[in-house]
Image (cartoon, rainbow, N blue to C red):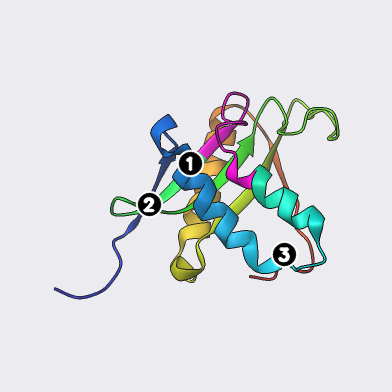
């Protein structure tokens, strides 16, 4: 048997997976937090709180076999942060908190998550997608 990873599959996160999905995604972002970036530490807590956003967004998990290796949050009708972010345009969907565990990068996990987001958005009649990122997040 080879040590090659299992093919990546993507589906909506189940409630029993929220903690693991949040932990994996926070780990994907951890490299961007420095000792003097308290805002990033708060953001890591927010990323890890999948349960706190699953009631108003769609959270996908990427799996290699039974192991969660990444996740993405898709805003279709409501925002993660209702008070700070502008309301979604009726044709808009928005991808947030897409993260792949560092040990699973460069294997198509992010692409599989993006594909699932695009597929779901199309099924909901959305015609454009937005994604926020920053310069520091080159990975």
Element at badge 1?
helix
Name which residue lies at 56% across and 46% down: 72
Q: Nearer the viewer, residue 51 or 125?
A: 51
Q: CA distance from mark 2 to mark 3?
A: 25 Å
Residue that mark 1 sits on: 19
Element at badge 3?
loop
* Residue 96 appears in view: no
The magenta stretch spans which residues? Answer: 47-59
Q: Quadrant of the C terminus?
A: bottom right
The first of marks 1 and 2 along the sequence is: 1
Question: Residue 33: which numbered mark, if any?
Answer: 3
Is residue 130 rendered to the left or right of residue 9? right
What crowding class fits label 1: few (fewer than 14 Cα within 10 Å), some (14-19), or many (20 or more)?
few
* Residue 93 appears in view: yes
Q: Nearer the viewer, mark 2 or mark 3?
A: 3
Q: Nearer the viewer, mark 1 or mark 2?
A: 1
Q: Quadrant of residue 27?
A: bottom right
Q: How far across and down, in percent of the image, does residue 23 sit? A: 52, 50
Q: How far across and down, in percent of the image, does residue 73 sit? A: 60, 41
Question: Residue 63: which numbered mark, if any?
Answer: 2
Q: Is residue 113 above or below residue 127?
A: below
């Amino acid at each position: 048997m080879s040590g090659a990873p299992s093919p990546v599959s993507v589906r909506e996160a189940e409630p029993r997976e929220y903690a693991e999905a949040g932990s994996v995604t926070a780990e994907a972002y951890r490299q961007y937090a420095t000792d003097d970036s308290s805002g990033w530490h708060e953001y890591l807590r927010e990323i890890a709180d999948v349960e706190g956003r699953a009631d108003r967004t769609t959270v996908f998990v990427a799996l290699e076999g039974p192991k969660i290796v990444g996740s993405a949050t898709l805003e279709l009708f409501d925002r993660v942060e209702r008070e700070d972010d502008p309301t979604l345009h009726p044709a808009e969907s928005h991808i947030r908190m897409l993260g792949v565990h560092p040990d699973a990068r460069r294997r198509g996990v992010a692409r599989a998550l993006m594909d699932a987001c695009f597929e779901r958005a199309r099924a909901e009649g959305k015609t454009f997608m937005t994604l926020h990122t920053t310069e520091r997040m080159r990975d």
